[in-house]
Amino acid sequence: MEYCRGTYCISYPELIDGGIVSKSNYDNWIKRDKVNVVRRGGGSGGCALIALDSLPDKYRAKVEEVYPDSRQAHVEAWIKSNYKRDEEAAAFFHNPKKCGFALHPDKANEYTVNASVINTCIKLYERSATTQKLFGGEYSWGMMATAIETLRKKFGHTLPASTLRFRKKVSQYKARGYSSLISGKFGNQCARVFTKKEERIIEGIVVLENKPWNKNVHDMYEMFVCGELDIYDPETGELMDPEDYAREKDGDLWVPSETTINNFLNKPSTKLRINRLLRDIQLMAN
């Protein structure tokens, strides 16, 4: 069974040879226009394809009886039919300034495929009517994970095979976007090149009274290294000198990417330290 023109279909041989319906009964359906023939058979087009949903109820039930894996196959066919490469993800992973790392093209493509597959899963999750039809009820993470694993070879993705790990990965993706798909080893590499002075710059920005959003920290960091913004040491209250705190890389002032900053700020140890700093500043103010 397969999708054809956006419709899930069963082939003529599967209906007749599978014993779902007799040829004479099928011919009667066609004559009386009882079923939806999505693709006519013959020629180079292959065999006829009939919309599964157009079959009378008892015959649809018989399809599931004769082909017990048909529902799982339906999920896989839907994913294949609705899969679309995420070009925004490709632009993100191939751009070091956006993703924070100079990824090898193969790795950038792998992450792009992973994002595209998850997008398809989320698309299905958000369509309750389609979910009801495909799963015969509520969204099934088990069936979805099985389908994704079966399609690993076709798409070339590297998403988790475990249902719970796959479910967690989707949740992380929905919360953090493309950056959630980047291996932790890249984040660890980034953390190693982050000096204590650079951490102190970010902490000094984050504890400012206006409590800037993560995406604003990058812009304020640029302003600091250019001498356009005063930042104070969050512990000593001392004014930090850009000449002492900023560093150069390849002949230019180095500023961490938004993703690098987000990774640092999302570390549990960083969150604990910033909360402590904010608490201490509040006590001093009182």
Image (cartoon, rainbow, N blue to C red):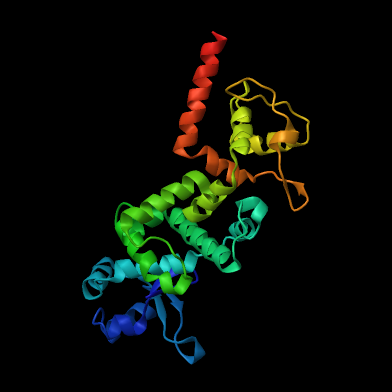
Q: Nearer the viewer, residue 9 or 127?
A: 127
Q: Nearer the viewer, residue 37 or 158?
A: 158
> 227 above or below 57?
above
Seen from this angle, which residue lies furthest top?
Answer: 286
Q: Is residue 54 left or right of residue 219?
A: left
Whether residue 75 appears in this view of the structure is no
Q: Nearer the viewer, residue 197 or 142?
A: 197
- Residue 209 at what x, y percent from top left? 62, 20
Whether residue 20 appears in this view of the structure is yes
Quarter of the rendering occupied by the C terminus: top right
- Residue 222 at what x, y percent from top left? 72, 38
Seen from this angle, which residue lies furthest bottom?
Answer: 43
> 135 above or below 61?
above
Quarter of the rendering occupied by the N terminus: bottom left
Residue sitting at 26 percent across and 73 percent down? 63
Q: Total number of numbered labels?
A: 0
- Residue 140 at what x, y percent from top left? 31, 55
Residue sitting at 78 percent across and 36 percent down? 226
Seen from this angle, which residue lies furthest left?
Answer: 65
> 218 above or below 113?
above
Q: Is residue 157 left or right of residue 95?
A: left
- Residue 217 at what x, y percent from top left? 64, 35
Q: Is residue 58 left or right of residue 224?
A: left
Residue sitting at 41 percent across and 70 percent down? 151
